[in-house]
Image (tube, rainbow, N blue to C red):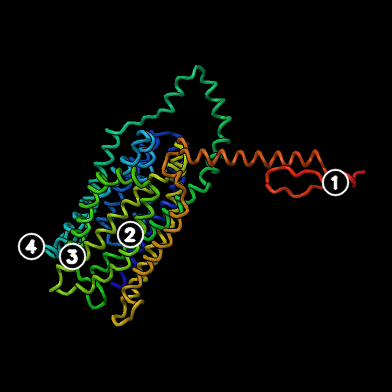
Amino acid sequence: MKEPGRYAGWLISSGHLGRILTSMLWGKWSDNHGNTGRLKVMQLSLISIVISSIILSWTLNFEIAMTARFFCGCLDATWSMVKAYASSVLPQDTQASTMATLGASYGMSMIIGPALGGMLARPAQEYPFLGIPSTSLLARRKYLLPNLATALIALIAAVLVRLVLKSHDIDSKQNETRSSQLYQAIKQTENIQENQQEQIRVCCARKPGLATAFYSLFSAVEYAEDLCFPLWAEAPISVGGLALGSHQVGILLAICGIFIVPGQLFLYAPLDARLGTTAIMKYGVEICIPLLAVMPLANLFSSPESRSSLWIWLGLTKVARLFVAEFVFTAQGIVSNNAVPNNIRGSFLGIQATICAVARIVGPILIGPLFAWSIQTPDRSFPLNYWFSFILITTGTFISLFAVLQMPKSLDRPFGSEHTSQEICEEHENIIEEGCRRRSASWEEMHPLKRSRSPHPFLPTTPTRDDFDEDV
């Protein structure tokens, strides 16, 4: 258990390193080619998953496995393209239900993925009644079947993207109605530099910056927990683990997915309409913090006679935390889409994916070795025992809460949408206040005399007798 933590962290991080190098390029390229480009990037990303999964299923060399993950990360921009495509082809008033549907699809993947992975991994050891010879291919390559299943699912998805999804390039259709192609070329040339400056300005503004900061922090701790939990669950009870098998961990994650799907389909949209997107993020993070903090208490129920209590505790902590975290990620997707206009959304999501990939590298690389170190000595005392990794993850989640608290309520609505009546009144008050300042400054320039202080900061002062005596 000492070495898997370190190797798992490096293997996961190699994929994110590839995303760091190429996410911005895919985002920029997809914006230049509209939704047609986004669909092509999706297809390429899915094909890269097929190729890398096949390589991982056959290799027994760690360096080759890392190379395959890095290759997959370089070509993988699926999630960014899906969010950009969905937000551009569907009405803005259905954005909450659309992102909730994407969250439900993620929940379905949590049902299918862990179940397949847990049931198909190490068939010779998990299913001895099948009589698989120790010299057979399935016995020597323990993870052949899960990786081949992943490749098959990705291949089916790539075919569906090609056959089912349409480009819906509304902007390009409008451009085709121009009467002069020469006018289009001149106009496009004049706007290249202006568009690039606009992209840089918008992507570096306060709202996109807050959305990116939160996404990076929360994703880092989520990926760290996703890496730490299976290692901890399969660790021996003597070092603080739960002594669960890989198939039991897969069943637990599948149970999480079963709860996530109806929650996303039936609960998220009404909650978003009632509370607001940023409020869902705030409350979700606040709920995740105590659930993460008490999760290691499951070790108290890890004895064989307390297995039922163990599953109840994991249901109250792990399942509930993933359920709430998926609400947070759905809200985060809406906030990121609302932070920028549609014409540069792909570029912004690419920049966001790059920064987030850096955070996702740091999380697993730190947590994997730290968890292995914390359980290396069974008699290590609290908080440096198996609690140590969960304390760090909880602290990171608490830090991400500060980014949510800084987000304005305007991120609940699409970029450029109508303002609320309160915001309009505030804007009018600012305009009136600025006008008073300018009139006061103009009056002072026209009457360069000593003036008594005015009781109101925006009303001009009146000259005194001393002013006239001085002039005389």
The three-letter amino acid code for the residue at tag 1 is Arg
Secondary structure of residue under mark 2 = helix
Furthest residue to the front? 465
Secondary structure of residue under mark 4 = loop
User: Alpha-carbon distance for marks 1 and 2?
Assistant: 67 Å
Mark closest to the chain's N terminus, 1 or 2: 2
For the point 61% across and 39% down, the residue is 432
For the point 42% across and 49% down, the residue is 353
User: Alpha-carbon distance for marks 1 and 3?
Assistant: 87 Å
User: Alpha-carbon distance for marks 4 and 3?
Assistant: 31 Å
Q: Position of residue 430 (x, y in %)?
A: 59, 41
User: Alpha-carbon distance for marks 3 and 2?
Assistant: 20 Å
Q: Position of residue 426 (x, y in %)?
A: 53, 42
Q: Which residue is mark 1?
A: 465
Label 2 crowd (10 A; few <14 / some 14-19 / many >=20): some
Mark closest to the chain's N terminus, 4 or 2: 4
Frontmost residue, 75 versus 112:
112
Label 4 crowd (10 A; few <14 / some 14-19 / many >=20): few
User: Alpha-carbon distance for marks 1 and 4?
Assistant: 111 Å
The C terminus: image quadrant: top right
Frontmost residue, 426 versus 262:
426
The three-letter amino acid code for the residue at tag 3 is Trp
The disc label shown at residue 131, or none? 4
Q: Which residue is mark 3?
A: 311
